[in-house]
Image (spheres, grey):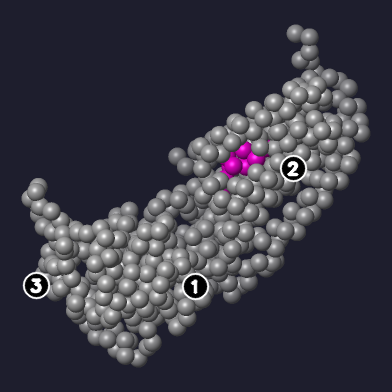
Amino acid sequence: MAQDDNNEHNKRTEADAIVFRDAAVARGGRTIWQHGSFSIPAGSVTAIVGTNGTGKTTMMKAELGLLPLTSGSITILGRPAGAANRLIGYVPQSYTSDIDSNLTAEQSVLLGLTGTRFGIHFVTKEQRAKVREAMAFTGIADKARLRLSELSGGLRQRVAIAQALVSDPKLLMLDEPLANLDLASQRSVVHVLARLNQELGMTIQVVAHDLNMLLPILTGAIYLLDGHPHYAAMNQVLDSSLLTHLYGTQVQVITTPQGDMFVTPTADERQDMVPDTHNPAEVAQFHHHAGSHGASDAPKQTGVTR
Amino acid sequence: MTGFAFDPEWMGTLSAPFMTNAFLAGLCIAVAAGVMGYFTIARQSTFAAHALAHIGLPGATGAVLLGLPVSLGLGAFALAGALVIGALGKRASQREIATGTVLAFATGLGLFFARLSSSASQQMQSILFGSILTITTDQIIGFAAFDAILLAVLAVIYRPLLFSSVDEQVAQAKGVPIGAMNVAFMAIMAGVITIAVPAVGTLLIFALVITPAATANVIAGTPLRAMVLASALCLVSIWGGLVLAAMFPAPPSFIIVSLSTLFWALAKGAGALRRR
């Protein structure tokens, strides 16, 4: 893929955007994941993948400094987690919470620029121009005066991305941006992300259940496996046995003659098949190897069972 | 029917001093309720706001029992309730079962206090259903002072409060102190409840604080316009209620709530027609 070459280039010329050093997070006394050690280059597009409850959203919260680490450190854009949030655009998982909101799309995007400011400020011409620019980028310029409650899920997602964009972030973090969207809406959101990465050089991180839509733009993935976060470049993630382990169900990677790749569950599973999965907390106990987590050792771990 | 007749002397009634007080009180209440109603809806905390009035009820009857001003007891209890709900976070103000349970208990406690003294018993009805015609000049000075503080505080925290109301997660990530915003909102809400209860009482307060803001939300597109319109609707409801109550023998609270509900129904109906 030509894109990979571009990102190889970026890797060499720019500093790392996200650095984990033996990071661990617990919630309510339960370890969600630990021994996270990896570096993600600036200018990359990374997916955070893993089954439900493995701590994907938790990882974003930790990167934003909203959840304390129980050990280790996370460095974002060269500063401790939480210290560089001004430079991060965050789009949380939305579900349908904003359905009742009577804010217009424009008002919502504007909050991304002015929402943190105390005191009396009038909206300047420059700020309005910035808002229009961000909305034009995500293709919702003509929806400015419509209320969020009048917009479809896909358009609301693009409003949320515009709101994150408007403050010129270096890093964009999106939590399940494609969930509950139809195919066309998924495609247009992915297209926006691709342009942000390629035209503005933005580093992007996406929590995703389904990798397929994102595959063309991904440069790597953090996969949450056995209570560990691992980072690997894309060619190493797209391995059937790893993905099968990751999703806890039989998965195969298909490459079409055109070079497109798909991750797909196998047609059916035997009823008595036991998926190769672990309780993260339990596995984390017998899984102590805090050293370097090169991507190459990951497939080997799939064999680690009691 | 002894009474539902038009009173030809209504102009004279309107010019009475107690009416002037009622009109001024209505203005103060409308400003506070319209502005805060918008935030209450945006934060999906309407039920918590409603509950605050009921949490204030035992404070009000308890104050009468002790010979203290009603507003003092009401305000103290509403503020205490608001701070507890606020400290628990925005999620807590959306927890309907816990809120409803506390609401019911507080109402019961209010009744218990009222039964302990005859003067509290007498005031019970006006606390539950309001008595805008008995508002004193001292109360109005208090209302006006509260409005001034409310507008000054809101001018400073307007944008972060709005951001945390409509998009709490993003606001938090961007560094808005959402905990402080939540406590500030609930504390101001307790104040709004305290000044609005004398007009329509704890039971009908929803129609005065929330309903005009909901009506304005249907019509106005920006938060600021919605707040101004909500205040205007609230003002028309109260003043219209006072005028009609002077013309016809009906309690002002009833007419105020009826007007507010009527505006809301009309806006909703028109909105539904427009969408078809």
The reply to whether label 1 and label 3 mark residues of one chain is: yes
Instruction: Select label 2 or label 3 by which is in front.
Output: 2
* Residue A263 in view, yes or no: no
The answer to whether marks 1 and 3 mark residues whose Cβ atoms lie closer than 8 Å is no
Report in which chain the residue with disc 2 lies.
Answer: B
Q: Secondary structure at mark 2?
A: helix
Q: Which residue is mark 3?
A: A257
Q: Residue furthest top?
A: B1
Q: CA distance from mark 1 to mark 3?
A: 45 Å
- Identify the secondary structure beneath mark 1: loop
* Residue at x-position 59% and y-position 63%: B177
Query: Residue A296, image x and y in percent?
Result: 19, 79
Q: Please give the label number shown on residue B75.
A: 2
- Residue bounds of the magenta highlight: B43-53
Q: Please state the horizontal and vertical placement of residue B207, each as a whole percent of the image.
A: 65, 35
Residue A52 location, x and y as percent?
Answer: 29, 56
For mark 1, name the chain.
Answer: A
Q: Which label sits in the foreground, 1 or 3?
A: 1
Residue at the image position 71 percent from the left and 61 percent from the top: B155
Amino acid at dot 3: Pro
Instruction: Kindly check if marks 2 and 3 are in contact, taking CB atoms under 8 A apart as contact.
Output: no
Would residue B269 be found to the left or right of residue A226 on screen? right
